[in-house]
């Protein structure tokens, strides 16, 4: 099978929500000595981008997005360890977290999937995470990006509390903070001192790639 067909297989496996096919295509890519970074970007990431566009067009829904993410991760689990160590060192790091008081993590999980596919090392702190913990982990790990989410208006304030905690521990100037979720807005992001408000997961990754080139 040619390089183009294998990479196309990776793309199609994500679009068709087939994790078994994704894993097999990733293994075939390594067997054929295809650059794992190229396989990820031109295969898996492209597939997830297509899925995201279909979601934005209301042609796919959250269950399909999660199934696509599972398919993408099946390929990533094979390809990421094959990236040469010297290439891994230059990759950016990110924390994802749902702020304190909110236990809804579907949006966060989609962002995590897109960031991972986009080349970030992601530390997922989970849901209902205290602001101080997020700030402390960011500093301890030397994180480049913090992606916060919530779908509940009552928990919005904890995004601002997290930014303040980063200022208090002296790490705010060393990382980007991006926020997302239905109750957030551009004006709210500006108000709390975040760097960006994500329209969706794809917007999050696209913005980060622009500002961190």
Image: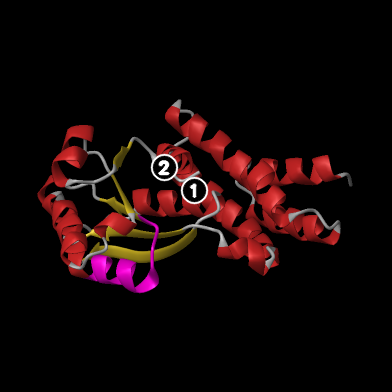
**Nearer to me, 116 or 62:** 116
Considering every residue shown, the one lying at the far bottom of the view is 140
Across and down, in percent, residue 172 comes to 25, 58
Q: Is residue 170 above or below residue 59?
A: below
Q: Which secondary structure is most common in the magenta stretch? A: helix
Residue 63: name its quadrant: top left
Across and down, in percent, residue 143 comes to 38, 63
Which mark identifies residue 178?
none
Q: Is residue 129 above or below residue 51?
A: below
The residue pinned by badge 1 equals: 114
Residue 183 visible to an observer of this rendering: no
Colour convention = secondary structure
Q: What residue is at 55 percent from the left and 53 percent from the top?
A: 119
Q: Is residue 70 magenta?
A: no
**Nearer to me, 63 or 54:** 54
Q: What residue is at 11 percent from the left and 51 percent from the top?
A: 157
Query: How much space separates mark 2 and mark 1, taking CA atoms?
Result: 6 Å
Q: Circle 1 sits in a helix, a strand or a loop, which is it?
A: helix
The residue pinned by badge 2 equals: 201
Across and down, in percent, residue 47 comes to 61, 40
Q: What residue is at 63 percent from the left and 54 percent from the top?
A: 19
The answer to whether residue 115 is left or right of residue 130 is right
Residue 133 visible to an observer of this rendering: yes
| Residue range highlighted in magenta | 133-145
Q: Circle 2 sits in a helix, a strand or a loop, which is it?
A: helix
């Amino acid at each position: 099978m040619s390089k183009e067909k294998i990479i196309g297989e990776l793309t199609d496996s994500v679009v068709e929500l087939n994790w078994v096919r994704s894993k097999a295509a990733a293994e075939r890519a390594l067997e054929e000595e295809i650059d794992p970074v190229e396989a990820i970007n031109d295969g898996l990431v492209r597939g997830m981008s297509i899925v995201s566009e279909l979601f934005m067009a209301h042609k796919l829904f959250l269950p399909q997005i999660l199934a696509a993410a599972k398919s993408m991760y099946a390929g990533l689990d094979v390809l990421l360890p094959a990236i040469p160590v010297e290439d891994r060192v230059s990759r950016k790091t990110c924390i994802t977290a749902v702020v304190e008081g909110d236990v809804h993590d579907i949006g966060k999980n989609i962002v995590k999937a897109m960031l991972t596919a986009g080349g970030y090392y992601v530390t997922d702190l989970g849901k209902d995470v205290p602001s101080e913990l997020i700030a402390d982990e960011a500093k301890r790990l030397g994180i480049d990006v913090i992606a916060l989410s919530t779908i509940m208006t009552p928990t919005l304030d904890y995004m601002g509390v997290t930014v303040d905690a980063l200022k208090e521990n002296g790490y705010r100037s060393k990382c980007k903070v991006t926020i997302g979720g239905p109750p957030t807005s551009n004006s709210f992001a500006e108000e709390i001192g975040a760097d960006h408000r994500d329209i969706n997961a794809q917007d999050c990754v696209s913005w980060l790639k622009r500002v961190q080139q």
